[in-house]
Image (cartoon, rainbow, N blue to C red):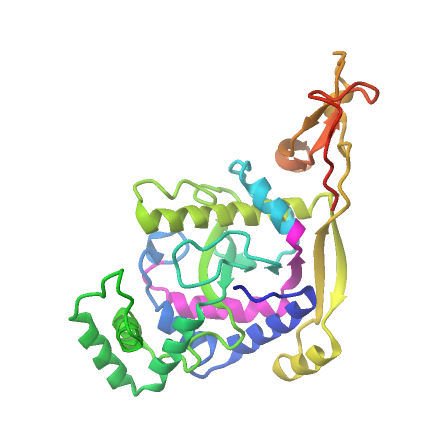
Amino acid sequence: MPISVTARDVPEIRARMTAWTRDPGPDGAANWLQFFLGPQPDHATESRVFDRADDVAATIAGTLAAQLPVAELFYVSSDMTELARHAATTLTDYRLHPEDLPAPVGMMVYAEPPVANPVDHHDGVSIVSWGPGRGGLWVHRWQRPSSDVARLGRVLAALPRDEAIRRGERAATRPEPHPDAPPTTEEGFDFLASGLLPNLRRAPAPPSFTPPHGYDWSGLTPMEYTDMEGWPGDITTGLDGDDLRMAEASLNLERTILATWLLMGQTIVRSEDLTAPRAARRRMSREAPDVDPGVRYIDLRRARTEPSDRSDTTTSTREYRHRWVVRGHWRNQWYASRNDHRPIWIEPHLAGPEDAPLLGGDRVNVLRR
């Protein structure tokens, strides 16, 4: 079950992440990313972001060290998360503008993972951080790992490196356990080591295996302001099985992040500035004394029964004899200042003459936030 995080917890999570990026030891970000990602991960050089001369892990570690300490913090409430998840299902591909972001450099924590993880040994992504990167914007995803994998990983990291490699090589020569017969703890440990053989050969295993702040870095998505092709985009063609489920979940997450940013710029959302508790601020002063202890709590305003913008109905000359329920939907709003449209979320509301009967009957259930 995912661990519950409140808005006031977020500043301390960021402080611990910042301390992790500054740690030069085996448990720090630089070694963690070298172990799990490496200097040339698969497909990284196929993008327009990295080339073969780049050390990808070192570049990402340096970027996180520069951006996390200065990121503006946001906590997205459960109601807001649910709306973003729902609104994302009908959001069409949209060319992001820099002014759509709630902050140039930020970190956003969802009250609950907005998209379930269908395959991996992690909870769904619940933290997103972002900042400038090659080509426009780099969006980093963070999620909590499985406790079982973390436990086995710490045992692996405690072994002498040569022994861990030997156990991985030995397990690699054995057939995988039958899916209907769960492996023993010893077998599970050996197969974990076999799956990490390339990692063990290029860097020491981090002693904590998972970062001390409790969240695994799970991926980087470059977003380009001038060309949104590929974010979100058609990444599921030709896939099946677990690969298809993971690709669909990634696509849903990207749309949900984009929907969250767009919704945060509308009047249906309210924000409140909060501060970490005193005890947390004392701990933060030891781990990362230069980071801000504030966080912005993002929630929905009380629901309305009328749309906030009636421009789509007041100019009509057509006469209606009923009222009806209009579902929530996106509408493209023209902005002359940037010579482009921006999706605006229109809340569910009643339309039609106020004194007319409701289409479908007089009974209506109203859900209030």
Q: What is the x, y in percent for residue 201? A: 27, 77
Q: What is the x, y in percent for residue 331? A: 64, 31
Q: Is residue 5 left or right of residue 147?
A: right
Q: Residue furthest top?
A: 318
At 33% from the left edge and 52% from the top edge, which residue is drawn?
A: 46
Q: Is residue 209 left or right of residue 112?
A: left
As drawn, 230 above or below 19: above
As drawn, 137 above or below 159: above
Is residue 106 in sight in this rendering?
no
At 38% from the left edge and 56% from the top edge, which residue is drawn?
A: 119
The answer to which quarter of the image holds residue 207 is bottom left
Q: Is residue 347 left or right of residue 55?
A: right
Q: Which residues are magenta?
A: 51-79
Given residues 220 and 132, the one toward you in this image is 220
At 40% from the left edge and 79% from the top edge, which residue is drawn?
A: 206
Q: What is the x, y in percent for residue 260? A: 61, 48
The answer to which quarter of the image holds residue 157 is bottom left
Q: Is residue 42 left or right of residue 5?
A: left
Q: Does 328 lie within the magenta span?
A: no
Q: Does 56 lie within the magenta span?
A: yes
Q: How many marks?
A: 0
Is residue 225 in sight in this rendering?
yes
At 69% from the left edge and 27% from the top edge, which residue is drawn?
A: 325
Given residues 149 and 290, the one toward you in this image is 149
Q: Residue furthest left?
A: 173
The answer to which quarter of the image holds residue 311 is top right
